């Protein structure tokens, strides 16, 4: 990217980065038993979702994962994250519900958070209709989607909502930019810069941190106890790394069963690179294997 003088995202603008992510050439993902697109009712209008059922999932009582794609809250779609959703579904053996939440700056906080939570509630309420076990539902996501997954887990706990089996947080956006060693070392990354982070957070949350709460910024949550078990994934070359890992350690300190994994030699967004980067493929396989093992547990193993 540096060789081709690709400017940072915040200098390109919203439309340009949306065009880039949607036009990227990606090989097709794994074949599924079925892929179903539909719209569900949400608090801000209908929400498009895409439901992936892998060949390995049983016809009834299958585990399920509500997945929120990355893109800094300003870009990404069901199409641009179709390959990732297929890989996660095939790797975990779970029915994956990919959620096409509304994007900023057209729709600001709490719209995407509300839609993430609404989609999770919808799946639990309609679990048996889709051959899913309501006691084996998880949330997960990458980058901004990981932040939405963390917030959904907090909201479900706080409101006595759906009882989730696990949360899968892949380099999640859980805080605004902080002065951390990883931010100082990798804050000029061509993949994700410090300026990009500020720009995208401001577009969704606004530019006044005093208005933030734990749903917009999960790291603000004072109490992380009694949350579902977690897989928290970081990349060594990611400016978000240290904030992600601190959130994982806080989950551990709150006695939440948490696997905290750092991948060397990789940068932010590596799950989008499984077609070309072998370490990304290994990471995908390992993350999915951990999630699959947790899905195999019984409802009695749920924390809290």
Image (tube, rainbow, N blue to C red):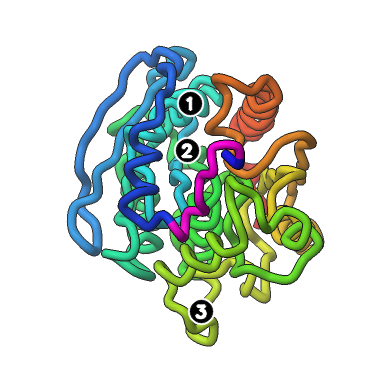
| Number of marks in the rendered image | 3
Dot 2 falls on a residue whose secondary structure is strand
Label 3's element? loop
Residue 201 at x, y percent in the picture: 49, 67
Q: Which mark's residue is nearer the viewer, 3 or 2?
A: 3
CA distance for labels 3 and 2:
27 Å
Q: Is residue 7 magenta?
A: yes
Q: Seen in the image, is 120 located left or right of residue 281? A: left
> 220 or 58, which is in the foreground?
220
Sooner in the amino-acid sequence: mark 2 or mark 1: 2
Residue on which the image places disc 1: 89
User: Residue 43 location in percent, x, y?
Assistant: 24, 63
Give the residue pinned by disc 2: 65
Which residue: 24% across, 43% down? 48
* Measured Cα–Cα span from mark 3 to mark 1: 33 Å
User: Is the C terminus in the top left, top right, bottom left or bottom right quadrant?
Assistant: bottom right
Which image quarter: residue 60? top left
Farthest residue, direction bottom: 210
Question: Residue 214: x percent and y percent?
Answer: 55, 72
> Which region is colored magenta?
3-11
Q: CA distance from mark 2 to mark 1?
A: 8 Å
Question: Pointer 2 and pointer 1: residues touching (CB < 8 Å)?
Answer: yes
Residue beneath disc 3: 212
Of residues 243 and 22, the one nearer the viewer is 22
**Against 216, is 126 above or below?**
above
Which corner quadrant holds the N terminus?
top right
User: How crowded is the residue under tag 1: few (<14 C-alpha within 10 Å), some, or many (20+)?
Assistant: many
As drawn, 82 above or below 72: above
| SS label for mark 1 | helix
Whichever of callouts 3 and 1 sits on the residue coming sooner in the sequence is: 1
> In the rendered view, would you say 98 is above or below 280?
below
Query: Marks 1 and 3: in contact by CB < 8 Å?
Result: no
């Amino acid at each position: 990217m540096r060789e081709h003088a690709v400017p940072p995202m915040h200098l390109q603008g919203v439309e340009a980065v949306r065009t880039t992510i949607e036009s990227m050439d990606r090989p097709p993902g794994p074949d599924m038993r079925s892929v179903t697109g539909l719209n569900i009712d949400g608090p801000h209008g209908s929400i498009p979702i895409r439901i992936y059922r892998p060949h390995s999932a049983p016809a009834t009582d299958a585990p399920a994962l509500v997945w929120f794609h990355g893109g800094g809250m300003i870009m990404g779609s069901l199409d641009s994250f179709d390959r990732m959703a297929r890989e996660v579904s095939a790797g975990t053996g779970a029915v994956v519900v990919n959620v096409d939440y509304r994007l900023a700056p057209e729709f600001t906080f709490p719209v995407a958070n509300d839609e993430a939570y609404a989609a999770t509630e919808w799946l639990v309420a309609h679990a048996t209709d889709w051959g899913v076990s309501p006691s084996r539902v998880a949330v997960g996501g990458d980058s901004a989607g990981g932040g939405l997954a963390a917030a959904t887990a907090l909201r479900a706990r706080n409101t006595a909502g759906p009882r989730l089996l696990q949360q899968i947080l892949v380099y999640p956006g859980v805080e605004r930019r902080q002065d951390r060693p990883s931010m100082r070392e990798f804050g000029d990354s061509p993949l994700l810069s410090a300026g990009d982070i500020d720009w995208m957070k401001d577009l969704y949350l606004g530019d006044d941190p005093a208005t933030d709460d734990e749903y917009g910024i999960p790291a603000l949550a004072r109490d992380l106890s009694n949350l579902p078990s977690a897989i928290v994934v970081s990349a060594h070359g990611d400016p978000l790394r240290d904030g992600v890992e601190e959130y994982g350690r806080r989950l551990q300190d709150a006695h939440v069963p948490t696997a905290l994994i750092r991948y060397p030699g990789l940068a932010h967004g590596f799950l989008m690179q499984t077609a070309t980067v072998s370490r990304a493929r290994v990471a995908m396989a390992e993350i999915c294997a951990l999630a699959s093992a947790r899905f195999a547990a019984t409802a009695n193993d749920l924390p809290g």
